[in-house]
């Protein structure tokens, strides 16, 4: 993805990438969170809109940030810290075991 930083220098391209990222997070990911909340997999007090907004900004920084290439060198560790640890934080008590084997 280093090429995305170079593409981001072109406003039209950056806008298209941001639109896609926004659509992906606020359509697909948000739907998954809503389904998980309805099934009581995640806690009731989780603000899904806020979580999606934070993930959008994180993805934007990861995609377009000047130093984002350094982060991508250890993708597995980054995935563990940015995705799995965050998800574990808002799983309900009855479903927290679902990620135990993924994080160990």
Image (cartoon, rainbow, N blue to C red):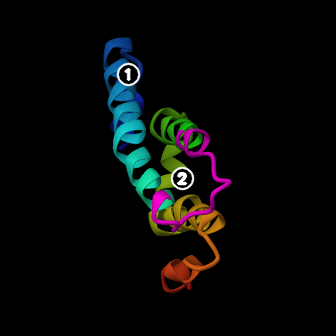
Identify the residue shown where x is 63% and y is 57%.
44
Magenta-tinted stretch: 38-52
Q: Quarter-wise, where is residue 19 in the image?
A: top left
Identify the residue shown where x is 54% and y is 77%.
95
The count of marks equals 2
Is residue 96 or residue 23 the one in the foreground? Answer: 96
**Residue 21: % across, % down:** 38, 35
Identify the residue shown where x is 49% and y is 41%.
59
Element carrying mark 1: helix
- The answer to whether 50 appears left or right of 16 in the picture is right
Element carrying mark 2: helix
Image quarter (top left, top right, bottom left or bottom right) of the N terminus: top left
- Magenta stretch secondary structure, dominant: loop
Vertical order, 41 against 46 (above or below): below
- The answer to whether 16 appears left or right of 57 in the picture is left
**Residue 92: % across, % down:** 61, 70
**Residue 104: % across, % down:** 56, 85
Q: Sort mark 1 into few (<14), some (14-19) or many (20+) by Cα contacts within 10 Å.
A: some
Asked if the magenta segment contains residue 76, the reply would be no
Q: Which of the labelled discs sits on residue 71, or is there none?
A: 2
Q: Quarter-wise, where is residue 35 in the image?
A: bottom left
Q: Which of the labelled discs sits on residue 54, or is there none?
A: none
Q: Quarter-wise, where is residue 16 in the image?
A: top left
Q: Sort mark 2 into few (<14), some (14-19) or many (20+) by Cα contacts within 10 Å.
A: few
**Residue 33: % across, % down:** 46, 53
Is residue 19 or residue 41 the one in the foreground? Answer: 41
Identify the residue shown where x is 39% and y is 54%.
32
Q: According to the image, label 1 marks what residue? A: 14
Of the image marks 2 and 1, the number of the one nearer the N terminus: 1
């Amino acid at each position: 993805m280093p090429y995305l930083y170079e593409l981001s220098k072109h406003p039209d391209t950056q806008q298209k990438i941001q639109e896609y990222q926004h659509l992906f997070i606020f359509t697909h990911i948000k739907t998954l969170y809503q389904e998980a909340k309805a099934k009581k997999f995640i806690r009731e007090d989780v603000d899904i809109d806020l979580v999606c907004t934070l993930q959008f900004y994180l993805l934007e920084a990861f995609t377009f940030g000047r130093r984002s290439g350094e982060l991508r060198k250890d993708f597995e560790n980054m995935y563990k810290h940015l995705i799995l640890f965050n998800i574990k934080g808002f799983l309900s008590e009855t479903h927290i075991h679902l990620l135990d084997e993924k994080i160990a």
